[in-house]
Every structure is written in structure tokens, then in C-alpha cells.
Image: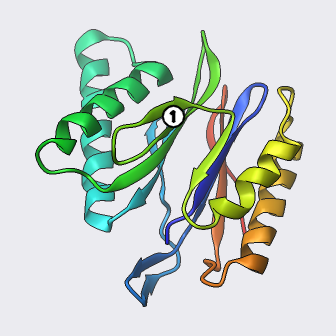
Amino acid sequence: MDFFVGIKGKDFVMVCSDTSAAHSIISIKQDEDKIVPIDDHKVFCIAGEAGDRVNFSEYIIANVKLYALRNGTPLNTKSVANYTRGELATALRSSPYHCNLLLAGWDEQAGASLYWMDYLATLNKINTGGTGYGSYFTLSLFDKMWHPNLTVDEATAMMEAGIAEVKKRLVVAPPHYIIKVVDKDGIRTIKTV
């Protein structure tokens, strides 16, 4: 039931996630932030079983911070994506984490980047992407509206249009969403819907 999407703009990445925590047919809470900061310029949008989601994200974040402390330099977004993919692949052979995720980040050298990963350790660098039932309605809309010089205002309008489509067409649509941006200034919340 988790839903999240991401859009890479010219010099930023915008991500959106639902804020619902549910187990089977029971709604547990409606204010869970599934967009987890890795460092000042990187976030995970992570979906899946609550235990796997929390354990895996905390494990990756701790190891990324440990690397930065040991080596005196933080990992760039591409390196975090490849490390995360490697850990998913290793876990797949013993006790897999059932989580799909987007990794959004901004680096001094590479600029903005967006990566999609699933629980089978598939890794793709993308311009727009997402997961969950809601993404069935938003990805075609994003493909139509996306262009390389996208501004924050245009991306916000795309996110709002995607959320409206999900709320209109998905029977089990989550009621609340959070939209965040990652750019040279760091991570900030644009709005909650």
C-alpha cells in the first residue's frame, strides 16, 4: 500500500510519499514520514514492511556515516546507491529485506540524481519514478510532463497533479502526502497534502 514518487529537475530532486502506516486492513497512523534523511543532501523514500523498512534504512545510514567518519569525506549519491544495492543483493541470499526505495541526492560534482531500487537489488538511475499502486497513475503523467530544465514550481505542480490523480482513481488511496526537495541548500519540506 506504500506509495512514493520522485522527479529529477535541473538542479534538484523532488520526492513525495504517503504518510500512512497500515497493517493488512488496519490503519495504524496517518503521520509517518517515510522520507528518511541519509545526510544533509540525500534521502531515502522507502516502502515495505515496517520492520524491514526501519532496520534497513538505519543500517545503511549508519554505515554511510561510519564511512564519512573513517575517511573524512562523505559518499556521493552514486556511491550510496551502489552500496545500498550491494547490501540488498547480499541480504537477498540469506534473509531479504522486503523494501523498495528511491534514493534522491545532490552532489557538488554530479548535481541532482535520483535512483530507484527494489527488494531484488535492481538499481536504475531515473528522471521520474515511483512505486506502489499510486505510481500506476502518476508515472505516465510524469513522463508526459517531465523535461530536463524542470523548475521546482513545475515539479510541485506535477506532484500535485499526480496526488490528485491517485486520490481520484485509486480505491485505497492514502489520505495524506508529504513533498520534499533535495538541492544544493539541503533537504526541505515543500508541503504536506
Q: Quadrant of the C terminus?
A: bottom right
- Residue drawn at point x = 60 percent, y = 9 percent: 109
x, y percent for residue 25: 42, 90
Residue 191 visible (yes or no): no
x, y percent for residue 115: 53, 34
In the depicted structure, whether residue 165 falls above or below residue 101: below
Q: Nearer the viewer, residue 113 or 129?
A: 129
- Residue drawn at point x = 24 percent, y = 26 percent: 66
Q: Is residue 133 left or right of residue 167?
A: left
Q: Is residue 177 left or right of residue 89?
A: right
Name the quadrant containing residue 88.
top left
Provide the residue designation for mark 1: 42
Name the quadrant containing residue 155.
top right
x, y percent for residue 59: 24, 42
- Residue drawn at point x = 59 percent, y = 51 percent: 130
Q: Secondary structure at mark 1?
A: strand
Residue 58 visible (yes or no): yes
Q: Amino acid at mark 1?
A: Lys
- Residue drawn at point x = 28 percent, y = 29 percent: 86
